[in-house]
């Protein structure tokens, strides 16, 4: 018996020892791969600053950088962001430059080909040559900071570099320009809608197709009224606020990612004290506030791209332009592919731009303001140091793009709005379809003067509200085109601001930012209910679905069935309308303004579209119910919007690791909201930050990013903001009173 017990004890000891060794090995591996990669946040680091710089981090890990010169502040900004987000920065420059396949392999080859075809690195290199000495100096200080971090942390960059088995190359000014161009690219994809429209025009009735690609809904709130259109940003004057000072809010809608698009930062140097969010890889604060002014920005959507149909011989590069032969130049590039052979790309470049696509044997070239000489400037450092409306406008008047709506407020009680960006003046405009390069259609004659762009300053109403829709008046003297949004969000924001009375605070703005009422989907619900009531025969299943829609309040809550049903019905209605305009085009028609265009058609019910609109609506309802049953079961009352409207938020590399992949990701999350709600959600699209500023009383301001400051999974700040973001809460934005949790000092290297 004793021998048996001794044997059991030896086995248990061996098992426990193996478990202990395994845990020890796991901890050692975690330390070596993940923990060692965390950047220093306390103590002293000797580096390439000219004078001491202090980096204090608050409870969210936000760096508050205090320097004795602007050069040192930008150096420290580069150093700190490299510590938090180096892999994100590296992938952004590789995505723009067409170099992802070098670290990922064959899966990224087509993405790289697209970037090479756009010539983004070549454009960035040309921009660098044209930068003023001052701009080069600012970019260079930032790049030196990034490189100081890279040099001092060799072998400790982060698990992504370890898993993919590569080291980052040094950062350059061109890389920062590439990051800016990638954002430009994200916000300007006009060419896609132009190809769809061209396809529909070939297949359908031009008059109907043109109606489906309008640039306004007919019920926008135009300049001079109570609000100014744009994209979820607003300023409210002191006569409507609790403090008697202005409130400014901004939530920019972009794709979710881990780490997120933005990084919170606070920069202090002589002549500058600014806080807000930065774009990793690009110096300065993009939106935020300084001691005197606050600003937000949202995408304007103005058309800054042109597709030209060119008569070009793709073998020789010769093409006909205005009755004479010209020679395109050919650019050869090599894409390095991890685990494979290098791939050569050949691109013909004409006077308009690169050969971008071929549709039905027609060669198309792309002209884009981002590639135009002299248009790219980093105006944000001037904005960061502006102290009034005049200085603010002087800075943003040089902004090349992408076109933005800018809202403004200052401590003197002023609020303002101005459209910005270099917006082309089109000569001999012949329509939105791709132009004929050899006839001179749609050539550009410079850019609309900044002073003539839509603007407002201290409107009598005390409100300036923007939400992506068309801000240009119908009598605007220049041609207006672009991808503008429907006006549902701006109308709802303005209505909620007015309903809030004259005691508005940042918390009221936060409440508005998370609003999920859809006036459009409620309109669809009422249209379907009225169509059903007009018919005699009743179907029990349809009656139950219609009864839900008849009483629904328009709230697109994730646990409700009505948003799911109305969205399915809208998709079928939109498809039916598109098919009527151009048979076979129902699946491709999905422009931003489509919801407002569908509403206008259903309200006015013009002749020539449908002989019986009610019959069309009921057919679409039946199709929507049948599809909903296939997806979520037979009983519509048990459906949930969040099962369809969900966010799958995963780290692109970490989520693929066995056993521990879930630690890197937020997961699959049901979302409230829709494309037509203030809290705009659609797939991976949603608010990329929520900023609510109490102008002058800065420490009462709120700021929240979706995930967290750090890109390192071992950091407490990797996803510490998600729960607050998802539940609609926020955090105080520390500015004058900083509760420092850690302090890092950068000192001059001797």
Image (cartoon, rainbow, N blue to C red):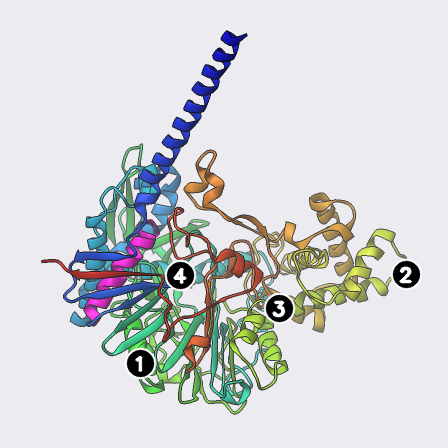
Find the residue positioned furthest to the bottom: 460
Main secondary structure along the magenta-highlighted residues? helix
Residue at (31%, 72%) from the top-left corner? Answer: 380
Residue at (19%, 58%) from the top-left corner? Answer: 144
**Segment tinted magenta in the rendering:** 70-88
Q: How far apart are marks 4 and 2 (CA)?
A: 55 Å
Question: Can you tell which of label 1 and label 2 is closer to the viewer?
Answer: 1
Q: What element carries label 3?
A: helix
Where residue 60 sits: x, y (%)? Answer: 41, 61
Q: Name the residue under label 4.
A: 262
Q: Is mark 4 on a helix, strand or loop?
A: loop
* First along the sequence among labels 1 and 2: 1
Q: Mark 3 points at which residue?
A: 597
Residue 312 visible in the picture = no
Q: Name the residue under label 1.
A: 386
Residue 604 visible in the picture = yes
């Amino acid at each position: 018996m004793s021998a048996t017990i001794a044997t059991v004890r030896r086995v248990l000891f061996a098992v426990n020892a193996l478990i202990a060794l395994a845990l020890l090995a796991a901890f050692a591996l975690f330390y070596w791969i993940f923990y060692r990669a965390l950047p220093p946040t306390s103590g002293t680091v000797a580096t390439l600053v000219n004078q001491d710089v202090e980096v204090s981090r608050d409870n969210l890990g936000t760096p508050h950088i205090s320097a004795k010169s602007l050069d040192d502040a930008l150096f420290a900004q580069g150093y700190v962001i490299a510590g938090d987000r180096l892999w994100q920065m590296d992938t952004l420059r590789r995505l723009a430059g067409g170099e992802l396949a070098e670290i990922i392999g064959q899966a990224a080859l087509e993405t790289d080909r697209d970037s090479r075809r756009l010539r983004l690195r070549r454009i960035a290199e040309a921009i660098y040559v044209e930068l003023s000495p001052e701009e080069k100096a600012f970019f260079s200080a930032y790049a030196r900071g990034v490189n100081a971090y890279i040099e001092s942390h060799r072998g400790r960059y982060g698990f992504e570099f370890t898993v993919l088995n590569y080291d980052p190359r040094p950062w350059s000014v061109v890389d920062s320009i590439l990051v800016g161009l990638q954002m430009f690219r994200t916000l300007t994809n006009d060419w896609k809608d132009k190809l769809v429209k061209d396809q529909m025009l070939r297949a359908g009735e031009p008059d109907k197709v043109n109606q489906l690609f309008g640039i306004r809904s007919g019920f926008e709130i135009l300049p001079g009224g109570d609000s100014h259109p744009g994209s979820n940003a607003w300023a409210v004057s002191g006569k409507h606020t609790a403090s008697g000072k202005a409130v400014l809010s901004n939530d920019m809608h972009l794709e979710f990612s881990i780490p997120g698009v933005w990084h919170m930062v606070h920069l202090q140097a002589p002549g500058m004290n600014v806080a807000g969010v930065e774009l990793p890889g690009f110096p300065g604060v993009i939106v935020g506030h300084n001691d005197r002014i606050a600003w937000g920005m949202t995408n304007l959507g103005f058309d800054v791209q042109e597709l030209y149909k060119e008569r070009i011989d793709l073998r020789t590069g010769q093409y006909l332009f205005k009755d004479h032969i010209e020679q395109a130049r050919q650019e050869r590039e090599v894409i390095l592919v991890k685990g494979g052979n290098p791939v050569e790309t050949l691109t013909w470049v004409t006077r308009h731009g690169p050969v971008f696509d071929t549709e039905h044997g027609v060669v198309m070239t792309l002209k884009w303001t981002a590639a135009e000489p002299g248009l790219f400037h980093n105006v944000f450092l001037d904005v960061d140091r502006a102290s009034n409306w005049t200085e603010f406008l002087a800075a943003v008047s040089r902004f090349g793009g992408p076109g933005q709506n800018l809202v403004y407020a200052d401590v003197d009680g002023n609020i303002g709005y101005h459209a910005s960006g270099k917006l082309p003046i089109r000569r001999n405009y012949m329509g939105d379809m791709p132009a004929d390069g050899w006839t001179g259609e749609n050539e550009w004659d410079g850019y609309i003067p900044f002073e003539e762009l839509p603007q407002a300053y201290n409107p009598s109403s005390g409100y300036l509200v923007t939400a992506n829709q068309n801000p240009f008046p119908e009598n605007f003297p220049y041609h207006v085109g672009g991808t503008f949004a429907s006006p549902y969000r701006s109308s709802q924001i303005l209505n909620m601001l007015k309903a809030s009375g004259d005691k508005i605070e940042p918390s009221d703005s936060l409440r508005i930012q998370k609003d999920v009422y859809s006036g459009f989907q409620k309109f669809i619900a009422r249209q379907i209910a009225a169509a059903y009531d007009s018919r005699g025969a009743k179907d029990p299943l349809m009656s139950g679905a219609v009864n839900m829609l008849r009483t629904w309040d328009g709230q697109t809550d994730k646990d409700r069935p009505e948003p799911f049903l109305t969205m399915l019905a809208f998709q079928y209605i939109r498809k039916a309308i598109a098919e009527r305009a151009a048979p076979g085009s129902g699946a491709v028609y999905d422009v931003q303004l489509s919801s407002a265009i569908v509403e206008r058609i259903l309200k006015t019910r013009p002749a020539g579209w449908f002989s019986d609109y009610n019959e069309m609506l009921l057919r679409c309802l039946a199709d929507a119910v049948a599809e909903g049953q296939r997806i979520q079961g037979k009983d519509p009352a048990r459906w949930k919007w969040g099962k369809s409207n969900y966010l799958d938020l995963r780290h692109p590399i970490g989520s693929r690791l066995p056993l521990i992949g879930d630690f890197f990701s937020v997961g699959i999350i049901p979302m409230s909201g829709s494309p037509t709600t203030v809290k705009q959600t659609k797939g991976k699209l949603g608010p990329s930050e929520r900023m609510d500023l109490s102008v002058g009383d800065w420490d009462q301001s709120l700021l929240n990013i979706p995930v967290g400051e750090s890109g390192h999974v071992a950091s407490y700040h990797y996803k510490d903001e998600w729960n607050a973001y998802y539940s609609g809460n926020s955090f105080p934005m520390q500015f004058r009173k900083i509760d420092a949790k850690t302090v890092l000092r950068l000192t001059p290297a001797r």
